[in-house]
Image (cartoon, rainbow, N blue to C red):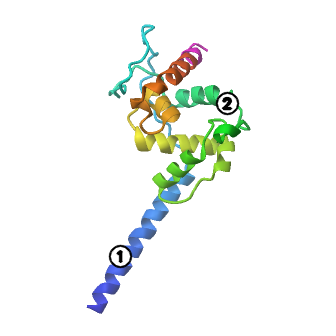
């Protein structure tokens, strides 16, 4: 019985070490870019609906990277040193402490600090981790509304105006 318990403990230790190495290797690698259809956004001048937009196999939207660029433009005018003290929102994407805590919770350990919001590359990594966790099959509207309103942001009508602003930026980026 004692030998069996030792073997189970050793197996558990090997599994934990293996999972830790996989997680660390993933964090050290370059973030992967989620791409959707490169088609242009077409809303016909209509406001997005108050219900969550549906992700489809070929969403008629711009890709993940352009959504990130539009959010950075909207949040900070692309300024990595931007600070909004009243909201404790920092950096190029105006990341708040609760977002950092949620990303660390998703990862299962303390990887990022609020100071990392001032690093455009770390802010981008946090954005990707967050979106991959909550909306891996999302689209620019879903990702933008989740960024503005948290995990339930796409369901909340108060994020529609934020999406309209991001949509305008996306359309201007697409024509450049």
Find the residue positioned furthest to the right: 81
The local secondary structure at tag 1 comes to helix
In the drawing, does residue 103 fall left or right of residue 96? left
Visible residue check, residue 169: yes
- Total number of numbered discs in the rendering: 2
Q: Bounds of the magenta span?
A: 171-176
Q: Nearer the viewer, residue 155 or 18?
A: 155
In the drawing, does residue 4 fall left or right of residue 79? left
How far apart, in angstroms, are the residues tagged by discs 2 and 1?
A: 48 Å
| 17 relative to 95, above or below | below
At x 50%, y 37%, the residue is 33
Type of secondary structure dominating the magenta stretch: helix
At x 56%, y 44%, the residue is 125
| 5 relative to 72, above or below | below
Disc 2 or disc 1, which is closer to the eye?
Answer: 2
Q: Nearer the viewer, residue 59 or 156?
A: 156
The numbered disc on residue 76 is 2
Query: In terms of sequence position, does the residue under pointer 2 or pointer 1 come before the other?
Result: 1
Q: Quadrant of the N terminus?
A: bottom left
At x 33%, y 83%, the residue is 7
In the drawing, does residue 117 fall left or right of residue 127? right
């Amino acid at each position: 019985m004692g030998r069996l318990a030792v073997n189970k403990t050793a197996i558990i230790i090997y599994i934990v070490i293996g999972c830790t190495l996989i997680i660390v290797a993933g964090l050290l690698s370059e973030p992967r870019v989620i791409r959707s259809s490169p088609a242009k956004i077409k809303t016909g001048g209509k406001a997005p609906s108050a219900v969550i937009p549906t992700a489809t196999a070929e969403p008629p939207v711009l890709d993940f990277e352009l959504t990130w660029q539009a959010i950075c433009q909207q949040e900070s005018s692309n300024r990595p040193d931007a600070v909004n003290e009243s909201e404790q929102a920092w950096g190029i994407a105006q990341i708040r402490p609760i977002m950092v805590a949620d990303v660390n919770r998703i990862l299962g350990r303390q990887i990022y600090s609020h100071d990392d919001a001032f690093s455009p590359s770390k802010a981008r990594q946090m954005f990707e981790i967050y979106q991959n966790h909550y909306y891996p099959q999302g689209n620019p509207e879903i990702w933008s509304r989740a960024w503005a309103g948290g995990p339930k942001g796409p369901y909340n009508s108060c994020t529609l105006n934020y999406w309209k602003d991001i949509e305008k930026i996306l359309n201007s980026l697409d024509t450049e």
